[in-house]
Every structure is written in C-alpha cells, then in structure tokens.
Amino acid sequence: MLKDRIYQFFERAHHELQARKWEGLALLVEGVKDSVFGGSDKAARQAPYIRDALGMQRYMGSPILVCIPLALASIYFYGWRSLAIIVLSYLVGMAVEFTFCAIRRHEITEGLLVTCILYALSLPPTLPLWMVAVGIFFAIGIKELFGGSGYNIFNPAISGRAFLLLAFPSAMTTRWYTPFNPLTDGLGGFLHWSPESVKGVDAIAKATPLGAFNSADIANPDLFTLVTGFGRADVLGATSALLVLLGGFYLLYTRVIDWRVSIVMIVSAGLTSQFLSFIAPARFPDGIYAVLSGGLLFAAFLNATDPVTSPMTVRGRWIFGIMLGVLTVLGRGLTGYAEWVTFAILIGNMFTPLIDRFTIPKSFSAPAIQKR
Amino acid sequence: MAVLASLKTFKGGHYFGLFEGTPRGVRLKAAPLPKRVLIPLRQGFSAEVAPTVKEGDRVKTGQVIGRTEPDPHKPSTPVHASISGRVVKIEKRPHPLGGEATTVIIESDGTDEWQLLERPANYEKLPPEELGKILYEAGVTCGGQAGFPTVYHSAPATPEKIRYLIINAVETEPFCEATDQLLYEEFEKFVQGIKILRAALGNVQVHIGLAYNKPRIYEELIERFEYYDWCTIHQLRPKYPQGDDAVLVRTLLGLLLPQRGYATDVGCVVQDVQQCVAAYEAVVEGKPFVERVVSVAGSAVKEPGNYRVRVGTPVGDLLEKNLRCNGRIVIGSVLRGSAVGDLEIPIVKETPAIIVLREAEPELLPVAGPGFDRDSFTGVYVSLPWVRYKRATTSLNGNPRPCVKCGYCVDVCPQNLVPALLGEYSANGLLSEAQALDLFACIECGLCAYVCPSKIPLLEQIREGKRKILSS
C-alpha cells in the first residue's frame, strides 16, 4: 500500500542519515514523518492501552481551522496584502523556531502554527511588512527562550503584538483601511493588493470602532457594521465579529477551548462596561459595543484560551476570565487606549501560575485513616 | 423499597463509544473445559494461602487445594481446584495482577467430577455467621476491580462495622460485557444472591446501582424488591468509571472514601453481579466459586464473545484460533490492566475480560480526516449514527509532547484531582508535593492518560509516584 511505502521511505531515510551521522537532518526527517503520520504509528507502552483519538496535531489544528475563514475574510476585506502578512509571519516564525529546535535539539511543536496565524490576524492591515517580521521574531523568540511550547508564560502571539504596540505605536494604532464592503464592492479584495491600491487615500480610515468611541469627532459605527464588519476598520482577523463568533462556537462545541475563559471573559467585559457606562458614559461604551469592538471577541476565543498560558483548574478559569474581562474594560475606559485586550491578557498570563496554585480543587476523598 | 427517580452521576468521567470487537449482547457460552489450569494461591491483593495438596494428588472440581486460617491482618479465603484431575506441579509463577504467586497446576482428567459444599437445609433461616462461613468456604471474593483486597468485599471481613451493601450493576469498562450479560441471563440467581449477601452481612441496607439503559432489569428489580424497605434502587448514567468503588459509594450515598482506604472503611461492602451469582450458587447449589464470566473481546479477536470460564484457564486457551492478527493482549481492562506476552497467564477471579487490540499501524495524515470511527473526549471528530463501532488499536494517536495544560485531565478526573500536576510531580520525584495534592485519592481509572492530547503516560507516572512513596 501507498502509505506503507511512504512510511518505509521515511524509516529508511532516517536510518541512512543516522548511519552517516547527520543528526540534524535525521531529526528533521523524523519530524516530517511524525507530522505526516500524526503519531498513529506510535503504540501505547503502558496502560491505558487505548488512547483518545485527539493528538496535539488535531488539538492545535482546530484553532487554525477556525482561522482559515477569518484569513479568507481578511483577504476579501483588505486585499492580498493580508495574505502577505500571514505568509511572512509563518516564514519568519518557522525560521526562528527551526533555528532554536536545531540548537536545542527539541522537536518542532504544533503550537508554532497557531501562534503565527493568530499573530498575523491580530495586526492592522496597514502595518509595514518589516514590522510584521520583527514582531513575530520577537514572539517566537521569547517563547523559545522560555523553553518552547508548553513552557512559555506569555501567550506568544499576544507578546509579539504587545511588542509592536510599544515599539511602533503609531503604525499599530493610527493607520487603518476601510475594508471592501460586500454590499458595494463585489469581489473586493480578491482582485486587489490592498484597499489603498484602488481607492488611494480614500481607503485610509481614521480609527477602529473603539478608536471612534474614544475620539469625539468620529462617528460611531452602527450595530450592523459592528457585527458583520462591512465597512468597519479593524485588525485583519477581527473585522467581522460574526465570523469570529461562528469560529468561537465551533471551538466551544468541540471542547477545544473552555467557555469558562472565553464566554466568561466576554460576559464580564460586557457587564462591566454596561454598568460603568451608566456612571461615565463618555469613557465607557455600552456592553454590546464594548464586546464587539477592540478585538475582544477574537482575543477571548483565540488568545485568552491559549491552554499553556491560562489556568488549568475550573475555578482558576473563572477567575482568569472575569479578570481579563474587567481589566480590559477598565483599562480602555481609564486610559483611553484601545489596545487593552492585549495588555489584559498579558497581565492575566502573569497571574496564571498563581491562580493555578491557589485554585487546586479539593479531592473527593477523606483523609487517610490510621490502619490497624 | 425506595425507588429514586432521578438519574445519578458524578463529576468528570467519560462515555466511551462502542469499540470494535465489543461482545455486546452476545449470549454467555461455556468455554470448553481446559486441559490444564494454573491456579494462583494468592487472590487479588489478599494474603497467599498454603497449598493443601501435593504434586501427584488427584483432586475433584471444587476441592480445596490451598487454605490458611483466616487472620484479620492477612485476609484470605480457601482456593479450590477448578477442574478434576491430577496436580502436576506447584511452583512460583507470574500472577496476572502483578508479581509472582505460588501456583498449583492441575492437569484435567476430562471427567469434571465435582465435590460440592454441604448445603444447608433452609438457607433463608441461617444466621449471618453461618452464611458468612459458607461464603468463606466457597471462596466468594470480589471480582472486577483488581487492586482491591478481595476479602474486604466478602462477608467474613468485619460484619459489625458494615451498614450498607452496595450492588454494582453498572459496568462501564469498555469491552467488558460479560457481567451485563450475566445480569440478563441469571437474573433470578442475582436477586437471590443479593438477599443472601444481605443476610450474611447482618441485614444491612442494600443500595443497587443500575445503569439506566437497562429498563427491563430495572422494572424487574422493582417488582422483586417492592415490599422490602431495606432496598434502594438507583439508576446511574453508564459513564466510566461509575463502577469503581470510590465513585459508586460517593454517587449512591455521598460518602467519601479515605485515601488508601476501602469501601469497608465507611461501612460499605461493594459487590458486583458476579459475586451475587456466586453467593447464590455457593449457598443454594453448594458450588464453590470456580467459574466466572469473562469477555473475550478486542479488535484483533475474530468472534468476540462472553464465556463462562474456569478459574485458572490459561489465556491462550480462550484465544486459540480466535485471533485475526497478532495483537496486544490486555488482562482485565484496557484502561488500567496490564498487557501480557505470556499466553500461560491464567484467568483469575478478578479477570472480567481478555482484550486483544490490534497493534498501531501508520496512517497517512490522520489529522485531516473526519474520523467517523474515532472515540474522543472532545468533539473534534465527527460521529455518525450509522458508524457503530469505534476503532480500537494500541496507537497513541499523536506524538508525545510537553504538557500544554489544556485541562482535559482536570475535567475528566472523577476524583477532582489535577492529574497533570500529580504526574509531573511524581515523575520528577517531588513526592511530598504530590501527596499534598492528594496523590492517594487517585483511583487509577486511567482516564487522564486516555484523554491527554500530549500523550503523557499520566497513569504510569502516578502509579510510580505511589510506589515510591509506599516503598520509602
């Protein structure tokens, strides 16, 4: 059979390379074999002898699956330039990860693929490509310095974005494109490099919806625009709240992400903002507006739920979700800065080990009794 | 009688799909009489008994071949020959539950001549001590859960402290269908057996935990126990590991078992269907417990079935000519049992099933498929109602990776533990930290290692940690 022949080819190649002492190449071949066969050839050595069909590939593949429609939508909204951003993130990210893996001799893990696309989708469409490269270099580099996937304390995609926000604040927050609108623009971005290449300066938007709320002289978009993303300027992946919601619900349904982080974060942010909008309506938008703007949905479903950097225990996830939601809204309102989702997640990440430590559930057992 | 309308269940756990090679609904068959049996003189984790026969002796089926007077510190019951024939050898051999045990090897003479116990004239009037003595003489010990001392489940333990008799009629282990089948086919013996066991324990309260997907049995049980105020029937969701002592006692009565303790520590005796039937056969028919039901199942088995098997039958006898391909032979449970390479390993009273799994074989891009025949704790694989059986191989279904703290083990743990931390601490020798997180509350159900997407052998790590603590 074909699969057996492919398998034997890999086995032989690995064997030959090892015989010639080309360890690095042999590891690479092994890695490619592992990703092609997904570990199906590896057998359980100890009990349990049957294992769940879910491996790390499929687990990490699920958010990527959800990101594909978002990426397609971003190409439609902002032209092929968004694909260039995504591809560049992957290229630089992989180069950094492979270098570290070769030096530190650990396997290449699937987390990288998620990080790169989540990072790319959370960037503004106008960002110069070299800045994209710098950001992902930082993101993957800092993850690897902490020991690679599973050992990082900060969400890599978010840390890359935070780095860009601090290093290039104006490029990250002040230049936006008005996206192609399916109601008026037909095939839109599928035919163009970017909105700017068609409409020129007309394509430049002043602010995202949250930026519009914070500034007195820009009109707030209506609810339809917020939900569909038709004509709403935002980061690549978060333009259409509807698509993000659909993807989020898929992840919730398949149990890949936990509702205690995502839904709790969204609801607590919405409630906090709604409540504070009664007190300080100039600083806090109403709950719906707060949830649908500033990339909150995207971050709640895809960044905050990063398993490595969010708590493991049930109570811990509640605390984490509430903390992120409240911090986001407070930060936005009190500082007038629209990027508080990013900082809230970073702060939450810092607290994750502590939360985990103090929320270990009580086991269903009585203390040991003195034996006769 | 109290009938509880609400379905009871517990936090965590997992509903397994129906794996290929599960003998669901296959009628019980008597396995052919073995040519030779290997009977270990140690049962479960109870004390080993001294042989009462010599090499060369002739024995009858049901004759005692080993006994040591009972001692509360070293509980044991007599061991019986399960076929008639000649004792050919008494030697140390590997025990199916681990370690070695003195084993009596009997060669069959083909006649299967029985030596029955003395039958009491009117068993319903017997005092508890007499009944307990009969059960002890018949060697009625616990089946099912290997790892729990058998005699703590049987009548002569400590009757004065026992307040509840719990009947475990919910089998949730994948592949183990024989006890369910026994429940259907020997319902009468099961009902009488419950009454006998209750009488032997001094007329305690009885709680029956029954899986809710057996409405016929449920109705019949109600009919039979309608007029007894000492019986409560609970309907349970068939979620693994509902049948485990700690989980069952907690679900039915809300009692928490002490760490490193047993159900008897909270005044409960847990018996499963096989024990009830064995108790009936011992007291009414005078038959010692020498035959139990065993499922022969798994993806490498040609015709999965449920068999009545004599204790001591070598595993090889049951699998002979019934294998499609070579596979991994697992004794008892695919989740917590152990794989054996030796076909001479005997079936013992604690063996509910023999499972042979196909070995892992490479598949091209398994990550891309819809996975209609995959069992998963998560919903990432699509289930179709007409794809009945789930694939069961020894494949890890993934590459080993560092822990990403996804929390599935926390979600699935029936004991409310954090298995990822327990495993990590145990593997790295941080034993006091592991104990601080209640390492010994773990019932070793194996679900954490089952669901782990990073394929970390959590069960093995936790067991190793326990071993290290106990041996230090």
Image (cartoon, coloured by chain):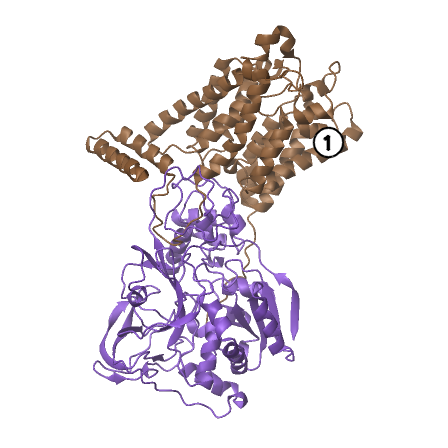
SS label for mark 1 = helix
The quadrant of the rendering that contains the C terminus of chain B is bottom left
For the view shown, which residue lies furthest in the front direction? B386
The quadrant of the rendering that contains the N terminus of chain B is bottom right
Q: Position of residue A323 (x, y in %)?
A: 63, 36
Asked if residue A344 shows in the view, the reply is no
Q: Position of residue A196 (x, y in %)?
A: 59, 9
Residue located 65% across and 31% down the image = A327
Color of chain B here? purple
- Up the image or down, B128 lies above or below B341; here it is below
* Residue toward you, A366 or B306: B306
Residue B219 picture quarter: bottom right
Q: Position of residue B35 (x, y in %)?
A: 26, 74
Mark 1 crowd level (few <14, some 14–19, many ≥20, 10 Å Cα): many
Name the residue type under label 1.
Gly
Color of chain A here? brown
Q: Kindly identify which residue carries mark 1.
A: A287
Residue located 57% across and 38% down the image = A250
Q: Position of residue B89 (x, y in %)?
A: 22, 76
Residue located 55% across and 45% down the image = A313
Residue A17 picture quarter: top left
Instruction: Name the side, left or right, on which B66 lies relative to A82.
Output: left
- Up the image or down, B456 lies above or below A213; here it is below
